[in-house]
Each structure stands twice: as C-alpha cells, then as structure tokens.
Amino acid sequence: MTTTAPPDHGIAPRTRSIPAVGDLTDRAAGLGAIGFAGLVIVQNVIRGSAPQPGADIDDVVAHYADHRGLTVVLTVTFVLSLGCLAAFLGGVVRRLVTSGRPGWAVLGGAGGMAIIALFASVVAAEQAISVLAAGSAPDPQAIEALWSLHNSLFTVNMLFIGIALVGLSRAGIAAGITPRAFARLAPAGAALLAIGTLSGPYTANGEAMVLFGVSVVGFVVWLAFLVATGVRLVRSDAS
C-alpha cells in the first residue's frame, strides 16, 4: 500500500507564542523615569551645603568630616535612583527598539549605561573622601586628588547625559511616547551639556563656573524629558 503525503502549500506550521512573564512594563519604565528625576532633585537639595569646585581643600575636609551622615543619606538615595534609572532604561529600550528608530534607541541606551557607571564613580569618590576626612590624620593631598577626580567625573558624565537625551528622545518621538517639543529641546540640551564636558578642565577646579551654569540648563532639559516621557509611559500602559 502506498501512502500519499499531504500537499505542501508552503505554509509553515503555526507555532504557539508564549507571552513574556514578568517583563519590564511601560508602567515600570515610566515610574522609574519619574522616580529617578525626583531623587536627583532631592540629592541636589541635600548637596546644597556641600563645597563647590574650587573650594579650599581645608573646607572640603571639614565638610566631609562633619557630615558623614549626609554622605550615608546620599548613598541611600543613589541606590534608589540607580534602580529607578535601570528600570527606565530596561523598559524604554525594550519598547523603542521596535520603533521606527531602533538605532537611536540603542544609542540612548548606551548613553544611559554610561551614566550609571559614571554616576557610581562619582558616589564612590565621595565615599572615599568621607572615609579619609573622618580618619585620625586626614591627608589633604589625597583628599584633594579625590576631590578633583570627583569633580572631573561629574563633568564627563554630562556628555553621556546628552547622548542618552538625544538618542532616547528621537526614538521616543517616533514611538509616540515623547512629546514632539523634544525634537528641538533635546539637541539644544545636549549641546549645553557638552559645553560642561568641554570646559571640564576649568570647571572641575572652579575656574569656569559660568559655563557649568550653562550646562545645568541642559541638565534641566534631561530631567524634563524623563518626567514627560515617564508620564506618557505610565498612561500608555494604563490604556
């Protein structure tokens, strides 16, 4: 007996798709963006009494020796803000790589990962200064070196904030989760942030604080992007 195989119409057998369980949702990404922006504002308020670049090293030593508790609080808020930023990047890049501008999404995600690394380095340098300042015989030269490193890392971080801002905003606009106003605001903010990095050798020691103030405007654009995109992500997940 000869059996005849069923005809092949060139249609692949249907496979059953398994939905992702426990993946980062738009809501988690949105709340992460809003939470990160809020915690960064809180951190800057807490740092209001901290020495500025160019301060006398004796003032830096005295501040960190007398405010160890403040360093602990900043470390706690750093851990929380890092978790928020990681949640935002994971959730938003997951969504944006399927948009019309996946390359910009990857670029923005790479900038965000660099922010995490540099932000962690800034906090680590601050902890090291606190440890040395609270010692029995603090070495002003060692603290001065760490203080310069701390300020320099901060200026370098501005460039990667600008990269994340441009990449994520362009992809976000294409996906409809970022307001179109950031088509102009994001490049302008990134350019201002880049000024802070380019002037780093002078800003880190307090010689060009005017240029640092210019870069702060770009940083405000970054925070506004996080909040605006975060709100839209939460709303899109709810709908």
Image (tube, rainbow, N blue to C red):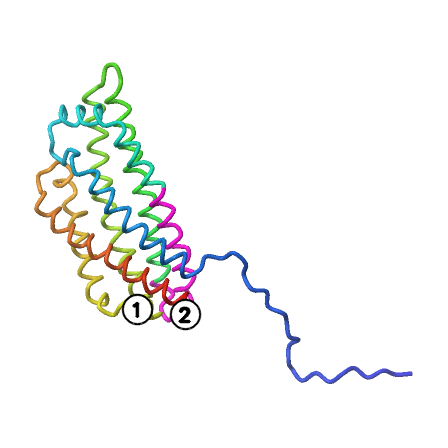
Q: Amino acid at mark 1?
A: Ile
> Relative to 214, is 57 above or below?
above
Q: Amino acid at mark 2?
A: Ser
Quarter holding the N terminus is bottom right
Residue that numbered label 1 is attached to: 173
Q: Residues within 10 Å of mark 2 (few under 14, many from 20)?
A: few
Q: Residues within 10 Å of mark 1 (few under 14, many from 20)?
A: many
Q: Position of residue 73 (x, y in %)?
A: 29, 35
**Secondary element at image label 1:** helix
Task: Identify the residue at image location x=59%, y=65%.
Answer: 18
Farthest residue, direction right: 1
Query: Taken as a whole, is the magenta stretch helix, strand or loop?
Result: helix
**Secondary element at image label 2:** loop
Task: Identify the residue at image location x=27%, y=38%.
Answer: 122
Task: Identify the residue at image location x=11%, y=28%.
Answer: 56
Q: Position of residue 177 (x, y in %)?
A: 33, 67
Which region shows up in magenta? 80-104
Say whether residue 22 is magenta: no
In this rendering, position of residue 177 left or right of residue 218:
right
Q: Which mark is residue 239?
A: 2
Say whether residue 87 is magenta: yes
Q: Position of residue 11 (x, y in %)?
A: 64, 80
